[in-house]
Amino acid sequence: MALDVPNLEVAIATIHTLPQVQFWKVGLELFCASGPIILDVLKDQGKRIFLDLKLHDIPNTVAAAARAIAPYGVDFVTIHTATGLAGLKTAQTALGESSTQLIGVTLLTSIDANTLQQELQIPLDPATYVERMADLAHQAGLAGIVCSPQEAARVKQRCGEAFLRICPGIRPLGTATGDQARSLTPNAAFAAGASYLVIGRPILQAADPAKAFDDICRSLI
Ligand SMILES: O=c1ccn([C@@H]2O[C@H](COP(=O)(O)O)[C@@H](O)[C@H]2O)c(=O)[nH]1
């Protein structure tokens, strides 16, 4: 679950409201507000951690950032695949013996074909662009990628089962799509080959977040 909340106090309250959640994603908003202390809070409670910092810089800088992140002992950390092969490789090497798995963000799930082709002037459809980025991440030795559930099946077929497909852009029926442009329901996402689903607002903004979480889990059985 995405712990997309504004500060440490709200984060702690949210973790207590949803004790059944075992794997939390800490993103830019919370990490900038709280710093690494939120990681200690989650570790003290035995939770798994996905640190979604989406590194994107020159190879020397992403490697230095990865070296600084390694001692946190999180499960996953993200880097944009558009960093390029050299940056992906140096970041992967910089994590060294750490158990943290490096995950490449291929194409943000908020980007649709029109934005990709007209605004960003990339002459590919999203699925083809994601495939290219998945290939780069695979070649660089990363553990997997973030992609939309709409591309999960193609990436699984291309890069193999062991290469993780972590999918945000998850929207249970009847929930607002918001800024997510390439989404699927939880059930359809797993059926398409997602290894992990990342879900934030459909649970956090529900009238009863614990019920929303349980309903999603039940929909997967
Ligand atoms: O391509 C991406 C990469 C990361 N995210 C993150 O996932 C969650 C999704 O939250 P929702 O509220 O369920 O939309 C959020 O933290 C994003 O930063 C993504 O959506 N797409």
Image (tube, rainbow, N blue to C red):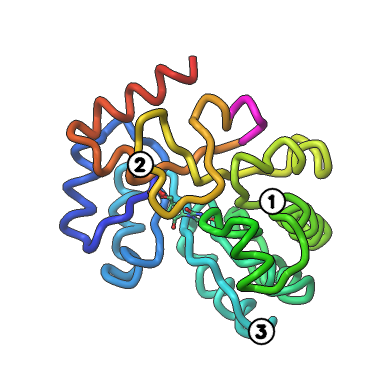
Mark 3 and mark 2: span between their CA atoms? Answer: 36 Å
Q: Is residue 214 above or below residue 9?
A: above
Q: Is residue 127 above or below residue 62?
A: above
Q: Are marks 3 and 2 in contact (CB under 8 Å)?
A: no
Please provide percent x and percent y for residue 37. 29, 64
Give the numbered dot on residue 7. Answer: none
Please provide percent x and percent y for residue 129. 74, 58
Residue where numbered disc 3 is placed: 58
Q: Name which residue lies at 51% across and 74% down.
A: 68
Residue where numbered disc 2 is placed: 176
Which is nearer the N-term, disc 2 or disc 1? 1
Give the numbered dot on residue 143. Answer: 1
Q: Foreground: 119 or 91?
A: 119
* Mark 2 residue type: Ala
* Mark 3 residue type: Ile
* Camera-side mark, 3 or 2: 2
Q: Is residue 60 above or below residue 175?
A: below
